[in-house]
Amino acid sequence: MVPLSYYLVLSGILFACGVTGFLIKRNIITIFMSIELMLNGVNLSFVAFAAHWHALSGQIFVFFVMVVAAAEAAVGLAIIIAVYRTRETLNVDHVNLLKL
Amino acid sequence: MLHLTLFLIFGAICVAGAVNLLVQRHPINAALSLVAVMASLAVEYLLLGAEFVAAVQVIVYAGAIMVLFVFVIMLLNAGEEARTGGSRVAILFGIPGMLAGSLLGAWVLITHSGTQEVPAGALPGPPREIANLLFHDFLLPFEVTSVLVLIAIMGAVVLAARPESVEQQKREG
């Protein structure tokens, strides 16, 4: 038996690590991975609440979050490839102008 | 008791992987620690009795999405992250801000959310019932997601295509 708040604290820690990575990382791929980490933290709290209230729809929402994350990863990585082709760098500090 | 022990072990692996993602400077190492986070999260889902979500987590997240990440890292030949002025400012403000925010959040959760417990395997979530929900109550969102995935596939192909090949297609078509 694990208290619900333990699951929520774990998911909060994962989300906070994702936010920190988003803030301190300069490599665009690692920033993208931090976003995935945040999504995982949210998924954990969805499943924990679903188990707590015996409601299966929480798991359905996790399924939809995963599908959206997969679509977002495909498009985002394609954008990263396009950025790398035009700028020849992955550092976000060097990608700060809209115009080349 | 066993349940709590397993939760703590895999939760620790999870947090260690997440912190390792922040510490590592090579993207490949960060990607592999993210795989560790996702695999241990799948075990947490199993502890909650959500077998379907655990299976999808391993197949879609730890499998498909991370393979995509590793593939792109190798394709772009990404090396070690360079330190810049912006990253120093970000570390200076990012880490204290995250620590303050997460401590506040954890304090609020632990003091205000009570201690109702989630029993092991609490959720009657066999794939059959999930499929029932997915294809009856959530049929419209499910179909809309399929359109979303289709659009994402087309967008990825268009964005990642080489510019010269797109121009060539325009000339031909």
Image (tube, coloured by chain):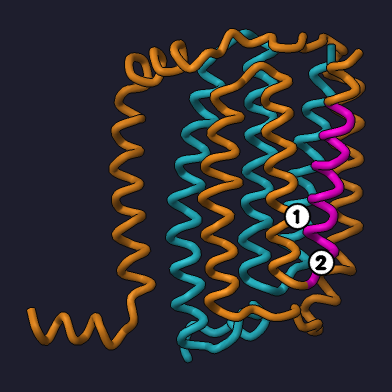
Chain colours: A cyan, B orange
Q: Quadrant of residue A33?
A: bottom right
Q: Quadrant of residue A58?
A: top right
Label 2 marks a residue whose chain is B
Percent position (x, y) of residue B114?
Answer: 86, 13
**Residue numbers of the magenta segment:** B7-25
Percent position (x, y) of residue B64?
Answer: 51, 50
Percent position (x, y) of residue A20?
Answer: 78, 57
Front residue of B42 and B158: B42
The residue that mark 2 highlights is B24
Give the side of residue B71 with respect to residue A44, left or right: left
Q: Magenta region, mostly helix, strand or loop?
A: helix
Q: Is residue A71 above or below residue B91?
A: above
Give the side of residue B19 with respect to residue B47, left or right: right
Magenta highlight on residue B20: yes
**Amino acid type of disc 2?**
Gln
Front residue of B109 and B72: B72
Percent position (x, y) of residue B120?
Answer: 75, 12
Label 1 marks a residue whose chain is B
Question: Which circle's residue, 2 or 1, is located before the other in the chain?
Answer: 2
Residue at 59%, 8% (x, y): give it. Answer: B124
The residue that mark 1 highlights is B33
